[in-house]
Amino acid sequence: PLIILRRPHEDGFGFTMFPFAMSKPGTMQLRVVSAPIPSILANLYPKVWKGTWRHPKLLDFLVKDVDVESDRPLPYQIGGDAKGTATSLQFKVSPTPVQMTQLGERLVPAGHTMVQVGPARMLLRLPR
């Protein structure tokens, strides 16, 4: 199975792959998918990317913290980046979330950091 967690955020470029991420403040969306890869790829656009694809082996949960355990090492990713394999992972919503705003052609205000995320520029103001 593929396990995906997503914190609430504003979806960019019309993608809504995690349609329930903003449903309840203070939670993150946990998505567990054990559907066949060909089925996922056949529906990648627009259904998967728009958040409308449903499958009996796709489960969504809103969680504050979660322990994920498996009987064998499974690959996992965080924020779309591969992080390796594990048999046990723990995730928890941070009590001090980082606020992110998409930044256009503006100057970076004091106390903020500019980050390039794919084609988008993001403005970060980290908690102190």
Image: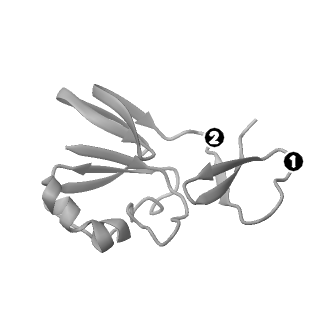
**Is 123 in front, or is 92?**
123
What's under tag 1, amino acid-wise? Ala
Instruction: Please report the residue visible at 48 percent of the width from the left and 62 percent of the height from the top.
Output: 22
Compared with 38, 13 (above or below) is: below
Nearest the viewer among 2 and 42 is 42
Residue appearing at x 55%, y 39% in the figure: 94
Q: Quadrant of residue 86?
A: top left
Looking at the rendered structure, which numbered label has been put on residue 110?
1
Please give the name of the residue rendered at 76% of the width and 35% of the height, measured from the top-left corner. Answer: 128
Counting from the top left corner in percent of width and height, residue 65 is at 41, 38
Q: Are marks 1 and 2 in contact (CB under 8 Å)?
A: no
Q: Is residue 26 above or below residue 65?
A: below
Q: What residue type is disc 2 on? A: Thr
Q: Is 114 left or right of 98, judged from the image as shown?
A: right
Q: Earlier in the sequence, mark 1 or mark 2?
A: 2
Element on which disc 2 rests: loop
Mark nearer the viewer, 1 or 2: 1
